[in-house]
Structures are given as C-alpha cells and as structure tokens.
Image (tube, rainbow, N blue to C red):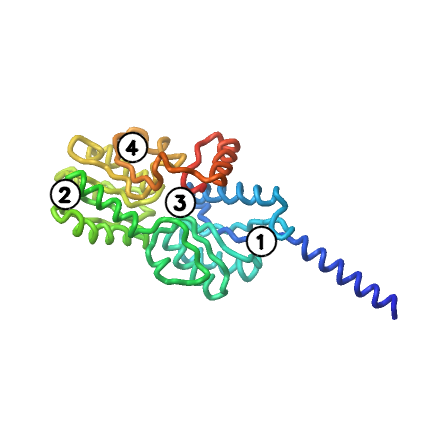
Amino acid sequence: MKRLKLAAVLCALWAGSTLAADPIRIGVSISQSPPGSVVQGTQVKDGVEIVKDMVNAKGGVLGRQIELVYEDNQGIPEKGRAATEKLITSDKVVAVTGGHQSSVCLAEMEVAHRYTTPYVNTNCWSDDIRKKGYPEVFNPGNYNTRVSSAMAETIAAMGVKRVVAFAENTDYGIGQAKLMAELIKQKAPQVDFKYETLDRAGRDFTPAILVLRANPPDMVVNIMLPPAAYIVMNQLYEQGVAPGPKTWLYDGAGIADYPDFWQNVKEAGKYMVSFGLYHPQMTIPKLGQEVAAEYTKRTKNEPNRLIF
C-alpha cells in the first residue's frame, strides 16, 4: 500500500512538473496572404517574435516559455472569425493578438468575447472596437476619431477648398471617410469634401481617377491600405493628378513608413503629405529601444509603428 501511495505521489509530482514546463500558447491571427495587407502582417509578426524571444530569454512567464501559434486570416472577416475559433478551441491558446485590419478585428473580437478570451488588437482603428466595451478586448492603438480629427485640423490649416478621398470598402476605410466628413464640416466648413469607396481587391482605379483629371481637386486623400493603396498612388501619378502643382496627395492611412513603401511607389510618393502617428522627437521607452535595436539587428531596417 505504501509503495502504491509513493507511486501515486511521484506520478502526481511528475505530471505537475510536466504541466509547469508546458509553454504558454498565444494565438496570432494576421494576414499572411492576399487580399489582406501582407506587409502589415509581416511587420506585426516580426514585432511579436522579437518580444516573445525577449520574454523567453529572461525565463518566460511563471517559469514557462511563450509559444506563438499563427493563423492566416487573409484580411477577411470570415477567415478571422474561423482562425480565432480554431486558436481558442483547438490550439488552446490563452489569448489572441495580431489584429491589424478593423473589419477582421470586429469579427474576431466577437469570438474572443464569447469564450471570454483576452484579445489584443495591434492596429485596428475602427471606433466600434472600443465602443463595444468588451472586458476581454484591449485596444492600445489609435482609432478613427483621433486620426480623422487630426487630419481635419491639418486640412483646415492648409486652406484647401476642395478635397476628394478614396476610401477602401471596409469598416476602416468607410468609417474614417465618414468621420472625416463630419469633422471637416466642424473644423473647416469652407471645405467641399467628398469621398468615394474603392474595392480594396481592385487593380484598376483609373475610371475614378480620370474624373479628377478633368476637374482637379485641391487635395486627394488616400484612406486605403497596401497593396491597393500603392496601386491608387501610382495611377494618380501616372494620370498627372496627384501629387502635382494643383493637387496635394495626403496619406490618410499612415503607410509612408512601411518598409516596402518607396520600392512600390517611387516617384508617386514624392511631395505627399504624410499622416504620422508619432512625433519624430517622441521619447521611446526602454522596451521600445530594445525592440527597435533588435529589429534593426535582425532585418537591417528601421522599425515602424507596426513593430512597436
């Protein structure tokens, strides 16, 4: 009997030590293939990999290593919903992160809320995310109201009279365009502002651009993410619309610091007014400095906001 009891105790201790050694699994749902923004997905992946390695090098969490489990949501809400469901129910992750496209975040957070699983989005700007008030959802980044307000103030200060925006046909694009219309009306009532939605999976936007060539506005605002954003920019430049002597081009999606920006737009990006999420003189905390140094060491590139 004593031997049986001793064996039972040893088994329990062995099982406990094995459990303690098991990694803590965190799900990462990002776009790794079109039509989603693969550039955004890659940057988010680089960022979380660096932090995961930093945490694990210091002993992990509660004596356990962090393990990241990836799912490709392709920037499609339905795919994001399925990815989050799989991560929580099959992969048994304790939390989900990576969200960087609003329409996908809005779908994924509903699944996380249903399972009461922590969900941390990295770059989703839709106001509806924070308005839901879900206790499981953490939204540390900017949101459309803040972004649109800053842009409306800039447009007012620049003294332009007629502004046209191209917005991608997603919650993010349409949401920001609508907010800009409201805020420009408040902050710059003299500005004639209109927006047109474009298919983010489209390749040819010249019909919408040719209308502007016939009657150039003072400013064209881009509220689209790559790859569609790059295509729009190049076609605006090729048609001689913007940037040009008559028309400003305003980057309203914060894409000017993407690592592949210049190689995709070249001349089309010159003289563009860029929306910046961080002031150049902004102080970076110690953790941010460490992440930036590690990213530069690994990639030989400067980090952008998606890394942080």
Tell me the kind of residue under disc 2.
Arg
x, y percentage for residue 182? 20, 53
Report which residue position mark 2 lands on.
Answer: 162
**Viewer-nearest residue: 37 or 193:** 193
Report which residue position mark 4 lands on.
Answer: 269
Marked residue nearer the N-terminal end (3 or 4):
3
Tell me the kind of residue under disc 4.
Gly
| Disc 3 + disc 2, Cβ < 8 Å | no
Q: Is residue 186 left or right of residue 121?
A: left
| Disc 4 + disc 1, Cβ < 8 Å | no
Tell me the kind of residue under disc 1.
Arg
x, y percentage for residue 74? 43, 50
Does 162 appear above or below 82? above
Marked residue nearer the N-terminal end (4 or 1):
1
Q: CA distance from mark 1 to mark 2?
A: 51 Å
Q: Is residue 304 left or right of residue 221?
A: right
Report which residue position mark 3 lands on.
Answer: 37
Does 101 appear above or below 160? below
Q: CA distance from mark 3 to mark 1?
A: 25 Å
Q: Secondary structure at mark 2?
A: strand
| Disc 3 + disc 1, Cβ < 8 Å | no
Extreme bottom residue here? 1
- Image quarter (top left, top right, bottom left or bottom right) of the C terminus: top left
x, y percentage for residue 13? 76, 60
Q: What's the residue at 20%, 36% (across, down)?
A: 248
- Image quarter (top left, top right, bottom left or bottom right) of the N terminus: bottom right
Marked residue nearer the N-terminal end (4 or 2):
2
**Viewer-nearest residue: 175 or 209:** 175
Q: CA distance from mark 4 to mark 1?
A: 41 Å
Report which residue position mark 1 lands on.
Answer: 25
Q: CA distance from mark 3 to mark 2?
A: 30 Å
Q: What's the residue at 25%, 39% (across, down)?
A: 250
